[in-house]
Image (cartoon, grey):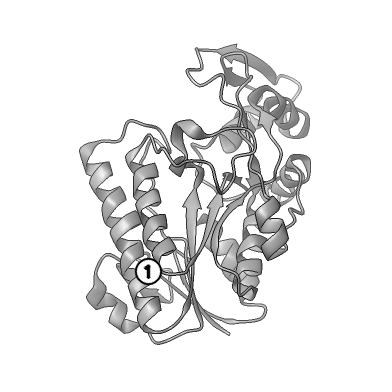
Amino acid sequence: MKVIVAGGTGFVGTYLTEELQKKHEVITIGRSPKNNLSIDITDKEQLKKLSKADALINLAAYIPNGGLSHHETTEETQECIKINTLGTYNLLQFAREKKMKFIQSSSLAVFGKNLQQKTNEQTSRMPLSSYGLSKHLADCFCGLHNATILCYSSIYGYGQRKNSVIPLFIEQAKDGKNIVVFGAGHRSMDFVYVKDVVQANMKALESKTTGFFTIGSGTATTMWELAEKVKSLFGTQNCTIKMDFKDEEEKIQVSMDISHANKLLGYVPAYSIDDGLQDYKRMLNG
């Protein structure tokens, strides 16, 4: 099978491309010169460089500097819409014209204030950020055209953005500093390991089933629990956990209901949070 991966040199894309290459011919595209083809997905003319493939997996995305916060600048909002919505639409149209399978990567940000325990495919979308809105609009276009949409919880793993909570905690622990937990550490998230995200994409690629699927570990972990796990695994003797600042989102309790993906795609997470952190450490240490 010939597979095009947009964003194939990014965090998730690097892992997915490595797995795909074991069985398939892979072409990575994006603005980075590291890709097989340097293509700006917001320019439809540049997509003409591509030849037909069997499938197109879209991992390309613009994430504002503040991550998934609700406070993007005007310029960041414009980039979100340009890349995440219009760029996805261009890729989707190309895939439709060439009769290719299309797999879209979505985000828990599409749910916004409706994030909850057991968030699932029926949970109402109510994005609170330009990023979340841009991904939701892209999902809507994909839904109109029989694409597969994989909506991920909080992805983690070696190589992710350093301003994400797990790399921050690990860096603090390794340096023997305080692991700083906002508020009382009661906020919980569903952390899904990057290799399980790869598995979800592989399952979707092999399946004839399309539609929207929530993808995660299926388990919630509080910030305090996460800090304790990181301290135990990465921390020096001087490392302690410190509560600091107020957490405006202390009451958020998030986990993904993955039963739909399990039933229709055969998706079963292979990594618990403990397993994922262990593998993260192995990769970090080389």
Q: Look at mark 1 in the image and give the residue it sits on.
A: 33
Q: Nearer the viewer, residue 25 or 219?
A: 219
Give the x, y percent position of residue 149: 51, 60
Give the x, y percent position of residue 109: 46, 41
In the rendered image of this protein, does residue 244 appear above or below residue 114? Answer: above
Q: Is residue 194 left or right of residue 79?
A: right
In the rendered image of this protein, does residue 133 appear above or below residue 224? Answer: below
Q: Residue at x 63, y 53 (%)?
A: 194
Amino acid tagged 1: Pro
Q: Nearer the viewer, residue 213 or 123?
A: 123
In the rendered image of this protein, does residue 159 appear above or below residue 39? Answer: above
Q: Quadrant of the N terminus?
A: bottom right
The answer to which quarter of the image holds residue 281 is top right
Badge 1: few (under 14), some or many (20 or more) residues near its Cα, within 10 Å? few
Give the x, y percent position of residue 95: 40, 77
The answer to which quarter of the image holds residue 23 is bottom right
Q: Nearer the viewer, residue 188 or 125?
A: 125
Numbered circles on residues, count: 1
Q: Is residue 136 left or right of residue 232?
A: left
Q: Residue at x 64, y 19 (%)?
A: 186
Q: Is residue 235 left or right of residue 113?
A: right
